Amino acid sequence: MGSRKRITLALVGLVVLVVVGWLVKENTGDSSPPSSSSPSSSGMQVKPLSQLPPEVGDTWRLIVKGGPYPYREDGQTFQNREGLLPHEKTGYYREYTVDTPGSDDRGAQRLIYGSGKELYYTADHYKSFVVVDPEH
């Protein structure tokens, strides 16, 4: 067998391997929506919006609508000083108050909304977060 034939066969074999590998990867990926106990790509727990306090849904609807927000701080940049959310440039995240029944101030609950459409909820004023799935 000539060297040209060997090179051609090697290249064809390589292309076949790449295509087969891509097909296997595409067909074995989990396409089911994340469950409330599964971690997101950030490693955080994912919670459906429907499983969070109703006030979280109220705040989410205000965000989608574009306001008006009950607190002047709502919509301002969230600095991510704790470093618990994925690192992004300043201005990427915005924070919004979630009303806490019985609280006489803003309370500890917040929704954080990223420019990439990510939604995070904290019930304990930035000590911990869950990823919110607003579709469920």
Image (spheres, rainbow, N blue to C red):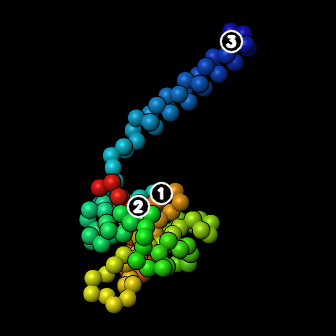
Above or below, 39 relative to 31: below
Callout 2, which amino acid? Lys
In the rendered image, is residue 17 in sight?
A: yes
Residue extending furthest toward the bottom: 104
Looking at the picture, how far across and down is residue 54, in whole percent? 26, 70
Foreground label between 2 and 1 = 2
Q: Tag 2 or tag 3, which sits nearer the N-term? A: 3
Query: Which residue is pictured at 39% across the width and 84% down the height?
Result: 106
Q: Which residue is mark 3?
A: 5
Q: Which residue is mark 2?
A: 65
- Residue nearer the viewer, 42 or 68: 68
Q: Quadrant of residue 6?
A: top right
CA–CA distance between discs 1 and 3? 51 Å
Q: Which residue is mark 1?
A: 117
Left or right: where 85 falls relative to 130 = right
Q: In the rendering, which numbered label is found on residue 130?
A: none
Q: Residues within 10 Å of mark 2 (few under 14, many from 20)?
A: few
Above or below, 31 relative to 37: above
Looking at the picture, how far across and down is residue 126, in whole percent? 44, 78
CA–CA distance between discs 2 and 1? 14 Å
Query: Which residue is pictured at 62% across the width and 66% down the height?
Result: 89
Q: Secondary structure at mark 2?
A: helix
Q: Which image quarter is the N terminus in?
A: top right
Q: Tag 3 or tag 1, which sits nearer the N-term? A: 3
